Image (cartoon, rainbow, N blue to C red):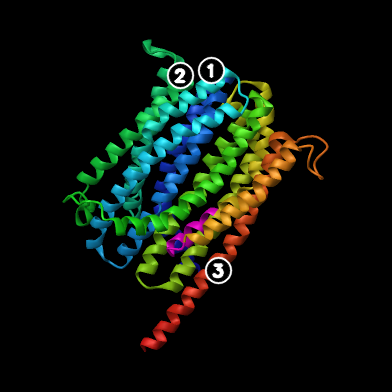
Amino acid sequence: MKTRIRTEAAALWQIAWPVLIGQLATVGMGVADVAMTGHLSAGDLAAVALGTSLWAIVLVTVMGVMMAINAVVAHEVGAENFSRVPHIMRQSLWMALGVGVLACLLLNLSTLVFAYLQLEAAIERKASQFVHVISMGMPAFALYRALYGYTTSLNQTKPVMLIALGGLGFNITVNWLLIYGHAGFPQLGATGCAVASGVGLWLMLAAMLLWIRRAPVYRPTYPFAQRERPHWPEIRAMLKMGLPIGVTYFAEVSAFSAVGLLVARFGVVAVSANQIALNFSSLVFMLPMSLGIALTTRVGQTLGEGDARRAHFVSWIGVALALGFAVLSAAFIMAFRHQIAAAYTSDREVQEMAAKLLLFAAVFQLSDAAQVTTACAIRGYKVTRTPMLIHVMAFYGFALPLGFVLGLAPDWLPWRPAQPMAASGFWIGLVMGLTVAGVLLLGFLQRLSSHRIRMHTLSGKIAG
């Protein structure tokens, strides 16, 4: 048994570690945006924080919709139906194009929400401009995530890592030029971040297309050998699987982003501190998320091979690995929260509040790791609706209502704290929402995987 555990853990990690580096590099772009504007001015940092709150909601929702491709391609690879993969990918790219354009339009319209937040005029203008500029990268991102799902489902994760690292290098360089106005470039502040990120996404898409064209490993399933018009039944089938994942991601990230927007009424310091805590939490979250992506691939391939018992084993090895790493990350955040805050900003008041919020981030590491890895394992089974319902209930039924009560303490409520807890109250709500989601998803994964084993055993007996 120990040998099986080590072998499967190694196989998962083999897929996960390049994905992790790629995910860290991608999120690192947002970290660089926040940290570099934080050292320019609190106003520019607040504008990036608010703009990123909207950008993140749409970006992560698109990423969720496109994750259906991971499960679909992984099942075909596990069943060795390689001839089906090019057709699936051509249709997924049509889907990605439509999703990306729609997301770009929605993102631009979403800036209307800033008018209702009672922001300073200069911050509202900068935040809106940030969103309008960065939205140009959304179609590229959707297409990139379609190809991302393709290459990871073939166990080819090296391009994901290297391209994301290149994108991070580009982002930091252009940020340095445009945020601060170095080397004769204009000082654009928050808008400079948006230019760097938007252009960087198009360059990452171009790099992925070039890699797939040149690398021999993609030739048996190369999707661009012929042209193909949109096949709506195929696209609808992928959307039927992908949209619940998108809603799942939307529920979680919109809850966190809504907190960022609601905290805006408590001033620039609260907004900036909240964004620092959220930004670093997102960075740490990439480890369990990368293990989750690897789980979707491994579970999908194993089920494609027809081995339900091994899929059950793979799922729980992945969850256990994620929980082990979560204990370490929680300890790290608690021990170094003041140093983490200081790395983002030189403003003492922002540092102190951010360090306080990072304590909440440390507390929810275990539940966050549990909910993301179990949800990804469940997607490997091509089941997406139940995780969606669990996440919507956890974040909109628990996290945001509790955060609203504790954070704002409105007078009309029969029960409320004596004083609004501001950002801390909202983060307590987030901790509760993640815990509810983690517990329910763990239970559902156990029932689902056990049911598949029983069904597989029963079909084997009937066939015999």
Q: Position of residue 306 (x, y in %)?
A: 37, 73
Asked if residue 184 lies left or right of residue 53, the reply is: left
Q: Is residue 457 left or right of residue 281?
A: left
Q: Nearer the viewer, residue 409 or 449?
A: 409
Q: Along the line of sight, which residue is nearer the eye, 313 or 130?
A: 130
**Residue under circle 3?**
446
| Disc 3 residue type (three-letter) | Gln
Q: Which mark is residue 180?
A: none
Category of crowding for the residue at label 3, using alpha-carbon neighbours closer than 10 angstroms: few (below 14), some (14–19), many (at least 20): some
SS category of the residue bearing label 2: helix
Q: Position of residue 79 (x, y in %)?
A: 31, 68
Q: Establish if 316 lies above or below 206.
A: below
Task: Identify the image quadrant of the C terminus.
Answer: bottom left
Which residue is rendered at x = 63% and y = 21% of the image?
Answer: 347
Q: Nearer the viewer, residue 238 or 108?
A: 108
Density class for disc 1 (Cα within 10 Å; few <14, some 14-19, many ≥20) is: some
> Is 457 above or below relative to 185?
below
Q: Give the prevailing secondary structure in the magenta stretch.
A: helix
Q: Residue furthest left?
A: 226
- Seen at 64% across and 48% down, the residue is 364
For marks 3 and 2, the one nearer the N-term is 2
Does residue 374 belong to the magenta stretch?
yes
Kindly identify which residue carries mark 2.
179
Query: The disc labelled 1 sits on which kind of residue?
Result: Leu
Q: Residue 32's spot in the image, x, y percent?
A: 48, 29
Amino acid on which disc 2 is placed:
Ile
Evaluate if marks 2 and 1 touch, with contact meaning CB atoms under 8 Å apart. Answer: yes
CA gap, disc 3 and disc 2: 49 Å
- The answer to whether residue 141 shows anywhere in this view is no
Question: From which residue to which does the magenta span run?
Answer: 372-383
Determine which residue is flagged by label 1.
Answer: 40
